[in-house]
Amino acid sequence: IDLKNEDLKDLHELGQGNGGSVKKVEHIPTGKIMAKKIVLIDAKPSVRKQILRELHIMHDCDSKYIISFYGAYLADPNICICMEFMDKGSLDGIYKKIGAIDIEVVGKVALAVLEGLTYLYDVHRIIHRDIKPSNILCNSQGEIKICDFGVSGELINSIADTFVGTSTYMSPERIQGAQYTVKSDVWSLGISLIELALGRFPFSESLSDDSDLSDFESTLSPARPGSMNSFAALGLPPARPRRPAAEKAKKDKRKSKGVSLQGGGMTMSILELLQHIVNEPAPRLSGFPEPAEAFVDSCLLKDPDQRKTPKDLLKDEWIVEARLSPFDLQAWANTF
Ligand code: ADP
Ligand code: MG
């Protein structure tokens, strides 16, 4: 379809992320419901056109584990990306609503994400780069699909100029400035699976008393050039004692997005977290079936050389089990 902004009627907002928002819209001429992602891009017209060309690859992505792409267009300072609407939303929203996710469902999520990552890499040589519960979507047919993968190098650059892509789902090697590989996505999957199974972000008790550190992704200010790489090059600061209770008062403030690197105490907490990810043993699942725990352990091997690729992990015992499991995801998705 040839999408034009004037043909899309806004229904309501689905959520906001870094550098943009997502709205549920109706394409009036066809009646089709879509999700429209609006990304503010401060780039030259030539770069913006390049981004649009790069996004075109998404038309060729055809997998039941990947969100369908309907089209993208420029709307003055923004780029609008129209995609399949998933009526049950993202998995972060789901666990925040219903609590910790049943481990059977978590197994199905792992399978879907591995299938999606394997498809993107084998067929298109695309590395996702942003696996986290908010980029894993579910619909009332019980389908699980991934979205927001790094198709456009120019888009990644443009966003990186504004928001440093510092995510708390980032692997130790990425924090230290190494190249992205498919194995970095596997680490992010491991963290995401623990979060879903526990119903909370896994690092939330390893540092201070913040309950929602996952909100700190992409919070560094553009004042530091070169983004994450120079950040790593600066060296992580030495460990600091936990913040005094008085700092607790700032907690609500910190929940708002876009805290700057030059800010006060909160900034250290993301640095502390990144340092923790690099220096401390990886988090683990415990009290779950052994194959689930073993799978998560293999995603969270700190040495990327030891970590398997998504394709190899499709052969993992727990994943094979998840594939065979008769668990009814459609029935599950209709319980909330
Ligand atoms: P983030 O992924 O960091 O939360 P985004 O801007 O990518 O930020 O998305 C904001 C929210 O919009 C997501 O958390 C998700 O719940 C919702 N969303 C994104 N894409 C879709 C979609 N295709 N269908 C339904 N909801 C979506
Ligand atoms: Mg997203």
Image (cartoon, helix red, strand yellow):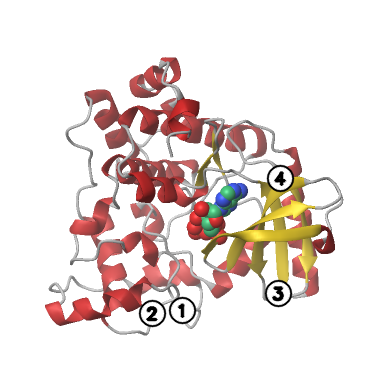
Q: Earlier in the sequence, mark 2 or mark 3?
A: 3
Q: Earlier in the sequence, mark 4 or mark 3?
A: 3
- Describe the element under mark 1 as helix, strand or loop: loop
- Describe the element under mark 2 as helix, strand or loop: loop
Q: CA distance from mark 2 to mark 4?
A: 35 Å
Identified by mark 2, the residue type is: Leu
Quick check: marks 4 and 3 in contact, CB under 8 Å? no
Identified by mark 4, the residue type is: Phe
State the residue in front, 234 or 62.
62
List the residue tagged with mark 2: 261
In the image, taking residue 322 as reference, residue 86 lies left or right, namely right
Identify whether 119 is placed above or below 8.
above
State the residue in front, 18 or 95.
95
Quick check: marks 1 and 2 in contact, CB under 8 Å? yes
Q: Quadrant of residue 235?
A: bottom left
Q: Earlier in the sequence, mark 1 or mark 3?
A: 3
Q: Earlier in the sequence, mark 4 or mark 1?
A: 4
Mark 1 C-beta to ligand 1 under 8 Å: no
List the residue tagged with mark 4: 69
In the image, taking residue 67 as reference, residue 243 lies left or right, namely left
- Describe the element under mark 3 as helix, strand or loop: loop
Q: CA distance from mark 2 to mark 3?
A: 23 Å
State the residue in front, 229 or 43.
43
- Identify which residue is drawn at 43% across, 16% down: 326
Q: Quadrant of residue 124?
A: top right
Q: Earlier in the sequence, mark 1 or mark 2?
A: 1
List the residue tagged with mark 3: 43
List the residue tagged with mark 1: 221
Q: Position of residue 209 (x, y in %)?
A: 18, 66
